[in-house]
Amino acid sequence: MQDFVYQSAPMRVVFGTGTLHQLPDELSRLGVTRALVLATPRQKDLVAGIREMIGEHFAGVFTGAVMHTPVEVTERAMETVREVRADCLVAIGGGSTTGLGKAIALRTDLPQIVLPTSYAGSEMTPVVGQTSGGIKTTQSSPKILPEVVIYDVDLTMTMPPKLSATSGINAIAHAVEALYARDRNPVISLMAQEAIRTLTHALPKICAQPNDKTARTDALYGAWLSGICLGAVGMALHHKLCHTLGGSFNLPHAETHTVILPHALAYNAPAAPDAMTRIAAALGVSDAALGLHDLARKLAAPASLREIGMPESGIDQAADLAVKNPYWNPRPIEREAIRELIARAWRGDAPENAIG
Ligand SMILES: NC(=O)c1ccc[n+]([C@@H]2O[C@H](COP(=O)([O-])OP(=O)(O)OC[C@H]3O[C@@H](n4cnc5c(N)ncnc54)[C@H](O)[C@@H]3O)[C@@H](O)[C@H]2O)c1
Ligand SMILES: O=C(O)CCC(=O)CC(=O)O
């Protein structure tokens, strides 16, 4: 075992079914009285229930959250923060809503309560990615880490099978890269393996039967563990590629992760054999990259960047961006090999080491 440093995040987590109803108590614990509720346009109906539940502590609402946290949207939301004199943020939704709350917290240090409805895991990290002029950059600060996260399985029941599949694989990606992180540690590695194992079992059940509450509970538990991994140790090539592609071509986040993950693993496999063994064991297969490719096919998830909206002409640009300021990665970043990885992902080929 390599030497390690372990630090856990200073936050409170409430997990269960029907836990949304603990929101008023959590607001009281924080000593706040003017909540600004954040959501996406698609999930604005959730706000009415919250308004009723928190009564006089409801200060206002902003339902304009969108993917990749564009700074123009954050600036519009900041006007609402000022208008309603919010003293806290309640973000209910997937990673896009959480991202907006984090971007506001970065600017104001307002406390945040997050109610995740997808498996993205952003609620567990002190990181926000913001997009300006078509470039997405990430930033970390203690101000960004939410104070309270309320996981309510009921909020995930409405996730359609396609989003459940891709969001679940987005979560698996955090756990996968934690296993070969330069700053990995044994506790996070245990969580990562458990996250991969739990999600791998739960996702096929959810896609077959979206109202399977036990599978939904397991998946949310796996997503929480994955989010802890994402917040605790450094991510590598896979996350760098996904945020570059997502920000530059406005690609859907979870789908991008789903398409890229088997290819990023195939790239890193020769340099991280121990991690690959652990990932394969957690997936219940003999080859990690192929196992993830097969899981995505079983879940009928998108297989190519082409089908999720990336133009073929973007392959070279993406390769250039990916090698610029790269994250630490177990295998050195080689531009031509990265270009080939992106081209394979664009076409929807199997990962490289799966051929033959
Ligand atoms: N900073 C971090 O640590 C971190 C980590 C992961 C993701 N992210 C960011 O999060 C964003 C992606 O998050 P996402 O994949 O959750 O997408 P999202 O939040 O945009 O959700 C996708 C769509 O599904 C809807 N949705 C979410 N949950 C639903 C539910 N239970 N039922 C019905 N519809 C639902 C949303 O309203 C939205 O329209 C990206 O911007 C990404 O960069 C950040
Ligand atoms: O907040 C972001 O957009 C950057 C971190 C991130 O997206 C993690 C991920 O790729 O899932």
Image (cartoon, rainbow, N blue to C red):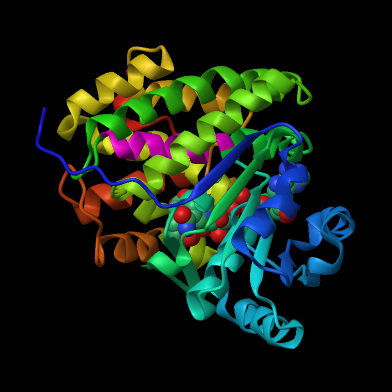
Residue 127 vertical position relative to residue 131 in the rendered view, above or below: above
Residue 263 vertical position relative to residue 273 in the rendered view, above or below: below
Figure quadrant of the N terminus: top left
174 magenta-colored: yes
Please tell me which residue lies in front, 319 or 332: 332
How far from the left and from the top, in percent, is residue 327? Answer: 25, 57
Please tell me which residue lies in front, 260 or 220: 220
Q: Residue at x 59, y 54 (%)?
A: 95
The prevailing secondary structure element of the residues shown in magenta is helix
Please tell me which residue lies in front, 121 or 285: 121
51 magenta-colored: no
How far from the left and from the top, in percent, is residue 278? Answer: 29, 21
How far from the left and from the top, in percent, is residue 354? Answer: 34, 23
Q: Residue at x 18, y 25 (%)?
A: 273
Q: Is residue 2 visible?
A: yes
Q: Which of the 4 image quadrants contains residue 317?
A: bottom left
Q: Residue at x 24, y 30 (%)?
A: 186
Q: Is residue 299 visible?
A: no
Residue 64 vertical position relative to residue 194 in the rendered view, above or below: below
**Total number of numbered labels?**
0
Residue 40 vertical position relative to residue 344 in the rendered view, above or below: below
How far from the left and from the top, in percent, is residue 22? Answer: 72, 45
Q: Which range of residues does the magenta coloring cover?
A: 168-179
* Horizontal arrangement in the rendering, residue 95 relative to residue 20 (left or right): left
* Horizontal arrangement in the rendering, residue 306 relative to residue 270 (left or right): right
